[in-house]
């Protein structure tokens, strides 16, 4: 039983590391606490409750998580400190030993965050408590999330977990096997977002193309159902495995009223030999086919691609093959990640190890290639008219927004208006801004 009166008048501070899915979940936690009377602490204000949502995709991510926990404890010395997320699931007892941490919640337990808080924080618990199941097969709960926090776009969690077990990855151990809610429940959440004034929803998850395992439905069925929700003008699909990006889905997005010409597709390597070492479920020929089909049906589509460099087994020859493959693809942006050794992963059995120096050099080359491709994509659209969804800007700062095909635009502070926030506006795309990360725009009527 939750005693809501115990939450009244309390303040909370939140810190999120990692992916959009984590940000969505943290936002939902904040929303639930706000409904119980918990206010978000202001800048410099000491909070009664601290919640840290962690990531564990790399060794660097683990280190950042520990730093964030220590910092929150130091900045809010009297707060009740809760840690959840992937690092909390993988290393719950390590986190539980950090001075100042009061509650650790794993992947199953975070779905019942409020109940655990009621049982521990509100009851005056004195000793740290750790709640996290130890086996991947026992991670079964699904914590719903559809929230925007202080952002303009909503993030709708449509799936959790992964069955793939790529050799470099610990995410299945942290998130469990693939599972999802029903299409009907997700459509209802989208309708609720529309009723709150939301205009754009990003579909998030761990392996969202795998949607349907739990309910016997399919991701394409979900996309078609969401496309019918009145009030939502835009949907974006977050990371979608190339073998699950069906030709039928591409065709539907090309003719959809609401799904944007914007794709994020993890490649990880442009070498077939490395893809086999990673236990990925496709080859470069299939990946190239998907890119070609998207561009045939949606020539102006933005395509972001994840690439991992320096993984075990990536010889110089394999990296050069990867670079040449990416160089020849009609893609827009690369998200480059250096490989990180993760305890318990099969990749540790691969003998060839890439030095840290070579990882940095390879990352630098791919990031340069990414900048060239992104700027060329932006430049092709200069002078065109576009519809932009603007986002709220900090006082005195430039206002930003995105076109349908995810070109970032910038409106100078002197031209920014509060009434533009969360509005679809017609603009003419101008020249690059000072650091070439956005295009300047001229406001038009419409």
Image: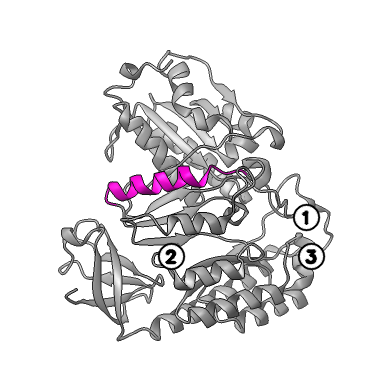
Which of pointers 2 and 1 lies earlier in the amino acid sequence? Answer: 2
Q: Which residues are magenta?
A: 179-197
Residue 218 image offset from top left, x and y in percent: 59, 54
* Label 2 secondary element: loop
Q: Which residue is mark 3?
A: 276
Residue 193 image offset from top left, x and y in percent: 34, 48
Residue 137 image offset from top left, x and y in percent: 71, 36
Vertically, is 373 above or below 2? below
Disc 2/disc 1 C-alpha distance (Å): 37 Å
Foreground: 220 or 34?
Answer: 220
Which of pointers 2 and 3 lies earlier in the amino acid sequence? Answer: 2
Kindly report the secondary structure that dominates the magenta region of the rendered protein. Answer: helix
For label 2, the crowd category at 10 Å Cα-Cα, with few meaning under 14, some 14 to 19 and many 20 or more, is: many
* Label 3 secondary element: helix
Q: Which residue is mark 2?
A: 259
Asked whether 125 falls inside the magenta stretch, the response is no
Numbered disc in front, either 2 or 1 = 2
Residue at image x 60%, y 65%? Answer: 245
Disc 2/disc 3 C-alpha distance (Å): 32 Å
């Amino acid at each position: 039983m939750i005693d809501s009166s115990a939450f009244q008048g309390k303040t909370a501070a939140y810190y999120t590391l990692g992916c959009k899915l984590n940000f969505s979940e943290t936002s939902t936690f904040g929303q639930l606490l706000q409904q119980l009377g918990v206010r978000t602490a202001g800048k410099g204000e000491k909070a009664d409750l601290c919640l840290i949502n962690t990531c564990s995709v790399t060794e660097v991510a683990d280190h950042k998580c520990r730093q964030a926990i220590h910092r929150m404890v130091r900045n809010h010395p009297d707060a009740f400190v809760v840690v959840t997320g992937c690092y909390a699931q993988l290393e719950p007892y390590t986190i539980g030993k950090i001075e100042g941490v009061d509650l650790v919640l794993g992947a199953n337990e975070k779905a019942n965050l409020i109940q655990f808080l009621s049982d521990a924080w509100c009851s005056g618990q004195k000793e740290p408590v750790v709640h996290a199941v130890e086996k991947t097969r026992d991670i079964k709960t699904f914590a719903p999330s559809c929230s925007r926090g202080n952002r303009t776009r909503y993030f709708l969690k449509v799936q959790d977990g992964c069955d793939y077990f790529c050799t470099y990855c610990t995410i299945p151990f942290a998130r469990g096997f693939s599972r999802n809610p029903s299409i009907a429940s997700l459509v209802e959440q989208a309708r609720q977002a529309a009723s709150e004034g939301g205009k754009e929803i990003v579909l998030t998850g761990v392996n969202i193309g795998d949607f349907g395992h739990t309910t016997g439905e399919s991701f394409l069925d979900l996309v078609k159902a969401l496309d019918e929700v009145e009030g939502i003008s835009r949907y974006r699909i977050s990371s979608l495995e190339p073998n699950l990006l069906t030709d039928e889905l591409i065709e539907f997005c090309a003719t959809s009223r609401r799904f944007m010409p914007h794709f994020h597709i993890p490649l990880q390597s442009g070498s077939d030999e490395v893809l086999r070492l990673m236990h990925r479920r496709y080859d470069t020929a299939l990946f190239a086919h998907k890119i070609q089909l998207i561009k045939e049906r949606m020539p102006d589509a933005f395509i972001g691609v994840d690439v991992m460099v320096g993984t075990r087994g990536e010889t110089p020859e394999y990296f050069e093959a990867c670079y040449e493959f990416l160089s020849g693809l009609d893609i827009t942006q690369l998200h480059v990640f250096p490989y990180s050794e993760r305890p318990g992963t099969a990749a540790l059995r691969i003998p060839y190890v890439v030095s840290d120096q070579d990882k940095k050099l390879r990352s630098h080359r791919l990031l340069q290639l990414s900048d060239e491709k992104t700027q060329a994509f932006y430049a092709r659209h200069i002078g065109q008219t576009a519809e932009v969804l603007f986002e709220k800007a900090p006082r005195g700062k430039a206002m930003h927004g995105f076109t349908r095909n995810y070109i970032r635009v910038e409106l100078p502070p002197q031209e920014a208006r509060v009434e533009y926030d969360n509005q679809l506006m017609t603009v003419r795309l101008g020249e690059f801004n000072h650091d070439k990360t956005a295009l300047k725009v001229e406001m038009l009527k419409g």
